[in-house]
Image (cartoon, helix red, strand yellow):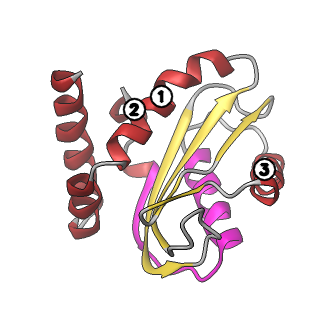
Amino acid sequence: MLIELLNEQVIEINLDVKTKSETVRRLVELAYNSGKIKNIEEVIKKIMTRERLLSTGVGKGVAIPRACSEFIEDFCFSFIITKEPIDYESLDNAKVRILMFCGIPHNRVDESVEYMVRIFRLFNQDSFRASLLKARNVKEVIKIFKKEEKDLDITS
């Protein structure tokens, strides 16, 4: 489950950023707090290279940047809600406020599919996104993820 890899050290809300690159950097810095990233700069470089090929701004105000790298020792995630919407060059051209970084060890790509399916199913729900945007603090964000993931398992 995603919530097992999300805690107060890897979540930030009301982040005051203006650009895609600032946001990506902060996501990786937060994920670094998990102790599972060996080289922040290399992971950022990997994400930005992928972003130049195709934006991970998936629509509906959400971006899910990810990196598969030998500098990531185990699965790790980070989550941000920005203070103001930013231009993330999203596929639907909408600005983004909700971002989730997925760090994937280079030798475990197949295992990442289950995580990615869960993430996309959660963020596709209007009520989930709306609840996150109303969260007043990190503890509320964690509570929302726990509830929605539990509901996701019930409806699967």
| Quarter of the image with the C terminus in it | top left
Q: Which residue in the protein does label 2 denote?
A: 118
In the rendered view, tell whether residue 93 sits above or below residue 99.
Answer: below
Q: Which portion, as a residue range, is magenta? A: 10-32
Is residue 49 left or right of 104 when viewed as pictured? right
Q: Report if residue 25 lies within the magenta region.
A: yes
Point out residue 2 in the picture as x, y percentages from the top left corner. Answer: 39, 32
User: Type of residue at label 2?
Assistant: Arg
Q: Could you tell me how far apart the alpha carbons at marks 3 and 2 are, in whole angstroms?
A: 21 Å
Residue 106 falls in which quadrant of the image? Answer: top right
In the rendered view, tell whether residue 1 sits above or below residue 148.
Answer: above
Q: Nearer the viewer, residue 69 or 54?
A: 54
Q: Using the image, tell me which numbered label, if any, was put on residue 115.
A: 1
Q: Report if residue 105 lies within the magenta region.
A: no
Residue 39 falls in which quadrant of the image? Answer: top right
Point out residue 38 in the picture as x, y percentages from the top left corner. Answer: 75, 38
| SS label for mark 3 | helix
Q: Could you tell me how far apart the alpha carbons at marks 1 and 2 are, in whole angstroms?
A: 5 Å
| SS label for mark 2 | helix
Point out residue 126 in the picture as x, y percentages from the top left corner. Answer: 26, 56
User: Type of residue at label 3?
Assistant: Arg
The reply to whether callout 1 and callout 2 are in contact (CB within 8 Å) is yes
Whichever of callouts 1 and 3 sits on the residue coming sooner in the sequence is 3
